[in-house]
Amino acid sequence: MDEKIKDAFHQAYAGESKAALRLKMYAKKAQEEGLPQIAKLFQVISFSEEIQGARALRMLREIKNTEDNLKASFESTTKIAGVAYEQFVKEAADRGDTTASTIFSQCRDVEDIHSKLYKEAMSHLMEDRETIYYVCSACGYVSDGMLPDRCPVCQAPKEQFSKF
């Protein structure tokens, strides 16, 4: 694929992915404000953005077999936790922004958990293991098989966890 076209697909993927998440958050806010039809509009367009982002991702041929996808996810998550979030924590701390520093450090900790889950999945790829995951809606922490009383990352109560 031509490099300029490849770059354009990377930009499209990034833009559509960001838009999809932003619109999901807008839908949630509209729902909280008692505007269900506006919430539905945001949800529908968010879904459309996901489709467009997925098309760009397929064109980039970044979706491989599951083993390769796990390895790529592990490497990406490890890099984000160890490099990007470490830098973000430092920058926020240097500027005295304790809220940002806390959020970035929680994100780093959650990414570390994601790395461990990917690594475990890679080592058990061929096993038929079923588990239930619980995800903290406050910080994104993922618990494998057990609902904690409180989130070990942000201390949110168990009622703020979603079951998968």
Image (cartoon, rainbow, N blue to C red):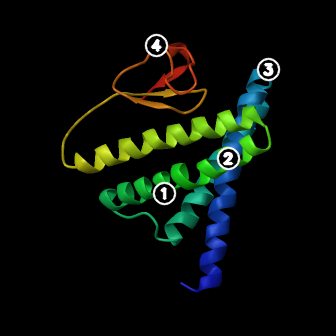
Q: Quadrant of the C terminus?
A: top left
Look at discs 3 and 4 and give the one toward the viewer: 4
Task: Estimate how packed mark 4 is, as few (under 14), some (14 to 19) or many (20 or more) residues with alpha carbons within 10 Å.
Answer: few
Residue 34: numbered disc: 3
**Of the residues under marks 3 and 1, which one precedes in the sequence?**
3
In the image, is 67 to the left or to the right of 36? left
Quadrant assignment, res 71: bottom left
Amino acid type for the residue under numbered disc 2:
Lys
Amino acid type for the residue under numbered disc 1:
Ser
Residue 149: numbered disc: 4
How far is the residue under mark 3 from the one under mark 4? 31 Å
Which residue is located at x 66 percent, y 44 percent? 89
Between residues 6 and 112, which one lies in front from this camera angle?
A: 112
How far is the residue under mark 4 from the one under mark 2? 30 Å
Q: Are marks 3 and 2 in contact (CB under 8 Å)?
A: no
Task: Estimate how packed mark 3 is, as few (under 14), some (14 to 19) or many (20 or more) residues with alpha carbons within 10 Å.
Answer: few
Which residue is located at x 74 percent, y 33 percent? 98
Look at discs 4 and 2 and give the one toward the viewer: 2
Kind of element beneath mark 3: loop
In the image, is 82 to the left or to the right of 143? right
Kind of element beneath mark 2: helix
| Rendering coords of residue 87 (x, y %) | 64, 52
**Of the residues under marks 1 and 4, which one precedes in the sequence?**
1
Answer above or below: position of 69 versus 135: below
